[in-house]
DNA sequence: AACACGGGGGT
DNA sequence: ACCCCAGTGTT
């Protein structure tokens, strides 16, 4: 079976232009013993998250937990704190579950179909690990591949209906035996040449084969559905301070930032303003508000401060304010904490 | 099929 | 001030 001209051109381009990334084996290089673990971790971190944001977090992570067995032995609490700031926290909960399943069965699955059963691995990630991690002829279709293929074949049907045609065309050009390198080549092309806006077609190794380029305005593709406006919502977070410590709670398992450490709040959700009572009676000092944008809403969070005599009710813990950086707060609450501390001075 | 789920980087 | 992103799980 011979490769398509597109595969040959892109693999040749990749041989000269591959990005150097901490989880990547250079084209032609030898995979390390922990390769699958590193590919798995990088792929999960890269779900809806940019390379620039992932890179330093990946390095710190593999230093702390060099293998799936190490990660399986960690507490979920440690892992959640280590994930703080990366967002989509279900990924961290699933990462622990998956690590324990992998450790329990004595190693990673060795097929795409088995990988797909691990928590947190959908169609894309299972295919990416199979192709990049151990060379299976899998076809991982992410947003980069969608964009490149939609342009190469001038698929102008709007997403998500276009996905079937995109997947079929991707399969048609994907080279057997080089699935992993080709996947990474598509990522690099999508990130540096075939970008969402202002693609650099004059530098593209596939230009001569690109129907989108031939038609003009390849940047229109893929066609995306209109997105809806984000509602503005409001909420309150409570900064309860005593003897250089602040009262932190653990968020419920369900919903936003599930099981993450946090400041107590008034029960706002991404769909509604909060209205819950303060966890203590007293003279609350308004220390200002912070803005934070989620996927589905823009939140204005008012921060109120109190130095109480009695203990707050309910589950929680006193945390030294000087060590708040180590509490593993999601970015929203880290911002709120910064606001509260600024008001103290 | 539609929605919930965070955050940061690029322009 | 948007737009985008190496998506997955639930309803």
Image (tube, coloured by chain):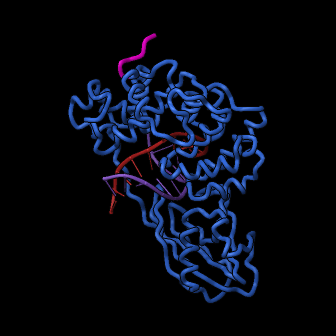
Chain colours: A blue, B purple, C red
* Quadrant of res A261: bottom right
Nearer-the-camera pick, A129 or A278:
A129
List x then y, in percent, for residue A68: 71, 40
- The quadrant in which the C terminus of chain A is found is bottom right
Residue A180 to residue A88: above or below: above
Residue occupying image coordinates x 64% and y 84%: A306
Q: Is residue A181 left or right of residue A197?
A: right
Residue occupying image coordinates x 34% and y 38%: A193
Residue occupying image coordinates x 67% and y 81%: A241
Q: Which residues are magenta?
A: A1-6
Residue A2 in magenta stretch? yes
Residue A55 to residue A282: above or below: above
Q: How many marks?
A: 0
Residue A119 to residue A181: above or below: below
* Quadrant of res A24: top right
List the single residue furthest toward the top.
A1
Q: Main secondary structure of the magenta part?
A: loop
Q: Is residue A203 left or right of residue A73?
A: left
List x then y, in percent, for residue A90: 62, 49
Nearer-the-camera pick, A13 or A168:
A13
List the single residue furthest toward the bottom.
A283
List x then y, in percent, for residue A77: 72, 56
List x then y, in percent, for residue A6: 36, 22
């Amino acid at each position: 079976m011979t490769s398509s001209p597109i595969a040959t051109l892109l693999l040749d381009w990749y041989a000269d232009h591959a990005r150097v990334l901490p989880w990547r084996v250079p084209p032609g290089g030898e995979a390390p013993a922990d390769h699958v673990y590193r590919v798995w971790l990088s792929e999960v971190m890269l779900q809806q998250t940019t390379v620039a944001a992932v890179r330093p977090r990946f390095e710190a992570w593999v230093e702390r937990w060099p293998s799936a067995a190490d990660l399986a032995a960690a507490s979920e609490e440690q892992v959640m704190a280590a994930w703080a700031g990366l967002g989509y926290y279900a990924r961290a909960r699933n990462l622990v579950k998956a690590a324990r399943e992998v450790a329990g069965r004595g190693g990673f699955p060795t097929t795409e179909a088995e990988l797909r059963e691990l928590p947190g691995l959908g169609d894309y990630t299972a295919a990416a690990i199979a192709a990049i991690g151990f060379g299976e002829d899998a076809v991982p279709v992410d947003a980069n591949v969608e964009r490149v293929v939609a342009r190469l074949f001038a698929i102008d049907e709007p997403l998500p209906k276009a996905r079937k045609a995109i997947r079929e065309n991707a399969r048609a050009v994907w080279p057997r035996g080089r699935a992993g390198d080709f996947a990474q080549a598509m990522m690099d092309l999508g990130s540096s040449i075939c970008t969402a806006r202002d693609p650099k077609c004059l530098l593209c190794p596939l230009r001569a084969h690109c129907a989108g380029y031939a038609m003009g305005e390849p940047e229109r593709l893929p066609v995306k559905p209109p997105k809806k406006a984000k509602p503005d919502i409001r909420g309150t977070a409570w900064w309860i301070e005593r003897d250089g410590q602040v009262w932190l709670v653990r968020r419920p398992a369900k919903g936003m930032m599930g099981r993450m450490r946090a400041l107590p709040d008034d029960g706002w959700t991404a769909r509604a303003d909060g209205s819950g009572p303060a966890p203590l009676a007293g003279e609350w000092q308004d220390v200002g508000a912070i803005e934070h944008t989620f996927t589905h809403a823009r939140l204005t969070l008012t921060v109120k401060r109190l130095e109480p005599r009695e203990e707050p009710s309910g589950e929680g813990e006193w945390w030294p304010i000087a060590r708040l950086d180590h509490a593993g707060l999601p970015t929203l609450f880290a911002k709120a904490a910064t606001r509260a501390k600024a008001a103290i001075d």
